[in-house]
């Protein structure tokens, strides 16, 4: 089945540690996105990638990093510089950046302990 | 900058009733898209319905329909004959029209804060 797979579903991190969230898609989509979701707020864009080997900062990129070495994969690293990393993270993809249909993964819940 | 506002943090209705979720937005663009997404307890975001601003006809998808008022910048979602499976967070979102697939950073979804909808048996 085609879709987006995020792993792990739950992730715990100690303060001061970097952690990487995985996002893989087999939809052959060019564009991929990372969003952060906090209670009572809409989704906020962290990073996006329009094509392989390219990525752009979103509205809240500080403390995060990404790579796009393969079309299928867009991992997100939450670094120790992110002051409040506890949140729900959603990955999405679309055929191209600006296409009106985005497909989402099931998310990763990151908790700092 | 575009903004999206959902003024109802939570709503609940009885099964089989009709419910309307509100959304207002602010933009200076003339051509854009509006969306309603559903996030059930599984947390996966699912597209419910999409409206193109230049189309005057309101979009419908089975039990889901919208009331798009461009001049008022209002985009409400009506769910008819509500079902228990409609229980979810509902998000309204905006996106500028992307034209001919230009590589432009502004073609991102702008999201409202969401409305939690509970369908009671």
Image (spheres, coloured by chain):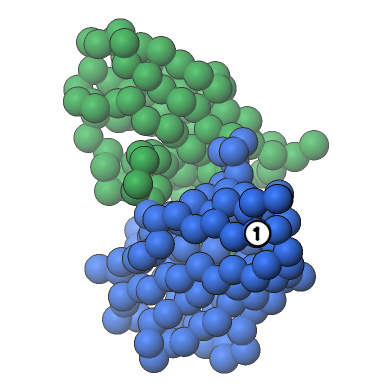
Chain colours: A green, B blue
Residue at 55%, 82% in the rendered image = B67
Q: Residue at x 62, y 89 (%)?
A: B57
Q: Is residue B117 left or right of residue A57?
A: right
Quadrant of the image containing the N terminus of chain B? bottom left
Residue B58, compared with residue A6, is above or below; it is below
Q: In this view of the protein, which residue sits in the foreground, A45 or B88?
A: B88
* Residue drawn at x 34%, y 48% as measured from the top left: A41
Quarter of the image holding residue B43? Answer: top right
Residue A23 occupies quadrant: top right
The residue indicated by pointer 1 is B14
Secondary structure under the numbered disc 1 in the rendered image: strand
Q: Position of residue A18 (x, y in %)?
A: 32, 14
> Can the viewer see residue B103 in this picture?
no
Nearer the observer, B91 or B116: B116
Against B3, residue A58 (above or below) is above
- In percent of width and height, residue B53 lies at 50, 82
Give the x, y percent position of residue A74: 49, 32
**Number of marks present in the image shown:** 1
């Amino acid at each position: 089945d085609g879709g987006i797979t995020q792993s792990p579903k739950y992730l715990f991190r100690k303060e001061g540690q970097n952690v990487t969230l995985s996002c893989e898609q087999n939809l052959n989509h060019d564009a991929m996105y990372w969003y952060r979701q906090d209670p009572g707020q809409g989704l906020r864009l962290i990073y996006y990638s329009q094509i392989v080997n390219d990525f752009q900062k979103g509205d809240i990129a500080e403390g995060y990093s990404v790579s796009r070495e393969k079309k299928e994969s867009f991992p997100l690293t939450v670094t120790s510089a992110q002051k409040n990393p506890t949140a729900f993270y959603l990955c999405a993809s679309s055929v191209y950046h600006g296409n009106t249909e985005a497909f989402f993964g099931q998310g990763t819940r990151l908790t700092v302990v | 900058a575009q903004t999206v506002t959902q003024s109802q943090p939570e709503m609940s209705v009885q099964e089989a009733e009709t419910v309307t979720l509100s959304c207002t937005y602010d933009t200076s663009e003339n051509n854009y898209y509006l969306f309603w997404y559903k996030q059930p307890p599984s947390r996966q975001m699912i597209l419910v319905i999409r409206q193109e601003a230049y189309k005057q006809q309101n979009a419908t998808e089975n039990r889901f329909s919208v009331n798009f008022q461009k001049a008022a910048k209002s985009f409400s979602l009506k769910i008819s004959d509500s079902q228990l499976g409609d229980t979810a967070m509902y998000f309204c979102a905006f996106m500028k029209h992307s034209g001919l697939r230009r590589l432009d950073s502004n073609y991102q979804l702008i999201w409202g804060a969401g409305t939690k909808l509970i369908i009671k048996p």
